[in-house]
Image: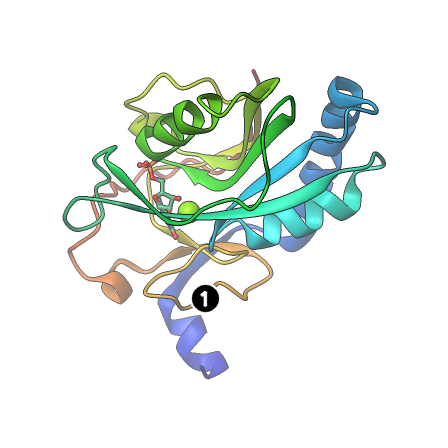
Amino acid sequence: MRAEDIANDIREVLLPEERIRQRIAELAREIEQDYGDDEPLLVGVLKGAVMVVSDLARELRIPVTMDWMAVSSYGSGTESTGVVRILKDLDTDLSGRRVLIVEDIIDSGLTLSWLKANLESRGPASVEICALLRKPERLVSDVPVRYVGFDVPNEFVIGYGLDYDEKYRHLRDIAVMQPHAYGASCHCGSADDAATPATH
Ligand code: XMP
Ligand code: MG
C-alpha cells in the first residue's frame, strides 16, 4: 500500500523500532537466565507473533528451537470468547520440553489461557508465556504471563506483526490507528497514556 495511505491511517507511533529492539533484548536476558541450556521451544502464535519470535530468537544467546501454531477464536467481531479452534498445530512433540509461548499481544487473555492449558496437557516440563504487549485494562483471564514487553493503552495497535484486516504487519514501529480507519467495530476505548515497560 502507498506510504500516504499508511500515514493517513495511523494516529501516532506508540513504540518506535528502537524501543522494541531494546525491550526484546531485555526480555532475552531474562529468558537466558531462566532457561540456560534447557533449549526452550519457542511457540509462535501465527500470524501476529512472527516478528517477535524472529527478533527474540536471534537476540537470545542460548540454543532454542521454534515452532508455530495458528488458532482462531470463535466469536463475533473483535471480542475473543476463549473458545479456540486449532488451524495449524505444532509439529513438535512437547514431552519433557520447556515451552515458551510467544504472542504479539494479550488482550482479554482468553486465547492464551486456552492455549496454555492445551499445551500443558501434552506432557511438557513447563509452559510459560511471553507477550510483547499487554492491554491491562482489558484482561479478563488471570493467565500468568511471565514475560511482558509493554503495557499499552486500550486502543487498536498495528505494526510489527499486528494487523488490521491483514494490513500493516510489515511496519517496523507499533502505532495506534486512527479510529476512522477501522470504523466503529473496535471495542477499544481512548486512553491517552503512552506505553510503559511492564513490571512484574
Ligand atoms: P485475547 O482477547 O484472547 O486476544 O487476549 C488476543 C488477540 O486479539 C488480537 N488483538 C489485537 N490485534 N491490534 C491487533 O492487531 C490490537 O490492538 C489487538 N488487540 C487484540 C490479537 O490477534 C491477539 O492475538
Ligand atoms: Mg495474535
Q: Residue at x 40, y 32 (%)?
A: 115
Q: Residues within 10 Å of mark 1 (few under 14, many from 20)?
A: many
Between residues 25 and 53, which one lies in front from this camera angle?
53
- Quarter of the view holding residue 136: top left
- Which amino acid lies under the numbered mark 1 shown in the image of this protein? Tyr
Q: Please give the name of the residue rendered at 57% of the width and 22% of the height, measured from the top-left corner.
A: 124
| Residue 108 shows in this picture | no
Residue 130 in view in this figure: yes
Q: Nearer the viewer, residue 29 or 100?
A: 100
Q: Is residue 62 left or right of residue 15?
A: right
At x 66% / y 45%, what residue is drawn?
66
Q: Quadrant of the N terminus?
A: bottom left
Q: Position of residue 195 (x, y in %)?
A: 50, 37
Is label 1's Cβ within 8 Å of ligand 1? Answer: no
Q: Quadrant of residue 102?
A: top right
Where does residue 50 sit, x and y in percent of width and height? 57, 54
Residue 4 quadrant: bottom left
Task: Give the total of numbered labels.
Answer: 1
Say how the picture is coloured. Answer: rainbow
Quadrant that contains the C terminus: top right
Which residue carries the number 1 mark?
168
Indicate the quadrant of ligand 1 in the picture: top left
Q: Residue 41 in the image: x percent, y percent?
A: 66, 35
Q: Secondary structure at mark 1?
A: loop
Q: Residue furthest bottom?
A: 2
Q: Is 120 displayed left or right of 43 in the figure?
A: left
Query: Does 77 sit left or right of 141 as displayed?
Result: left
Question: At which x and y percent is residue 104?
Answer: 49, 44
Vertical relation: 79 (above or below) 173: above
